[in-house]
Image: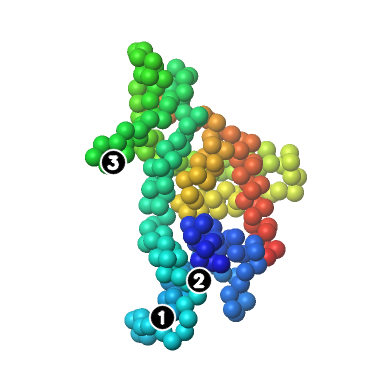
Amino acid sequence: MIFNRFLSVGSATLLAKELAVDGTCSKKGKPINKGYLYKLLKNQVYIGKAVHKGKAYPGEHEAIISMDLWNKVRTIIKESPRVRANHTRAQTPALLKGIIFGADGRAMTPVHTKKTNKLYRYYVAAEILKEETHEGIVRRVPAGEIETAVIDHVRGLLRAPEIVVATWRAARGHDENISEADVREALHDLDPLWDELFPAEQTRVLQLLVERVEVHPDGLDIKFRVDGLETLVSEIRGSMTEQRAA
């Protein structure tokens, strides 16, 4: 079950959280954390081998994990979360689609081109596609660079005291029992988890938090959604409550 779910989730951190919610424990009755999962997923006993002093030999017991499943899981584990995210993002090249605009207020369009089997992605000003020319408009920006800049800015703001306070004040309108410490813990918990998220989930979170990104010749303007921060805090707190209950 764990091997199959890891293949689906692709993240030991997320799977550990799911297993905690489900109440799945180790043989000693302890919660399964990320470190335990990695040891389990690397244990060759499950594929019918016996391990002695670091070397694996054919065992006398029957395998319970097929080699096909084992190899697929190993392929995922060998890649770092960041590399995994970059590979997947190349296949879903619209992280800022719908929220990125030029200085003229018109949406920038994601485009890509392929040269010598390498994918190049950009966000292009609408006027370029319509063959118009205006001064003061950024014609195009590399998608990877601007996505990284926006993500890093968002991650930094999640730790900013003024964002924590603003989110707490807004959240109190829906939950009078929520404390500033609750909000701070929820927002801070997202940052170390970010690199473990698949690009599709990163996109959902980013578009939940960011209303608009405007590209100017001298930099970026990013407008945040306070209601999005409230929603995110509610989701994270709900997950934490379920884990504690488990």
Work out whether residue 46 or residue 160 is closer to the camera in this orientation and state it. 46
Q: What x and y, as percent, mark residue 35?
A: 48, 69
- Left or right side of 127 for 232: right
Residue at image mark 2: 36
Residue at image mark 3: 118
Q: Secondary structure at mark 3?
A: strand
Q: Residue at image x 64%, y 36%?
A: 227
Query: Given the current orientation, which residue lies at the most extreme right position?
Result: 176
Q: What x and y, as percent, mark residue 56?
A: 36, 81
Q: What x and y, as percent, mark residue 14?
A: 54, 58
Please indicate, yes or no, whether residue 181 appears anywhere in the rendered image. Answer: no
**Where is 169 relative to 66, above or below?**
above
Work out whether residue 96 or residue 224 is closer to the camera in this orientation and state it. 96
Q: CA distance from mark 3 to mark 1?
A: 40 Å
Q: Nearer the viewer, mark 1 or mark 2?
A: 1
Residue at image mark 1: 49
Residue 116 bears which disc, if any?
Answer: none
Q: CA distance from mark 2 to mark 3?
A: 37 Å
Q: Residue at image x 43%, y 25%?
A: 108
Q: Nearer the viewer, mark 3 or mark 1?
A: 1
Q: Quadrant of residue 231?
A: top right
Q: Residues within 10 Å of mark 3 (few under 14, many from 20)?
A: few
Q: Secondary structure at mark 2?
A: helix
For badge 1, the amino acid type reads Lys
For badge 3, the amino acid type reads Lys
**Where is 35 relative to 166, above or below?**
below
**Where is 95 relative to 196, above or below?**
above
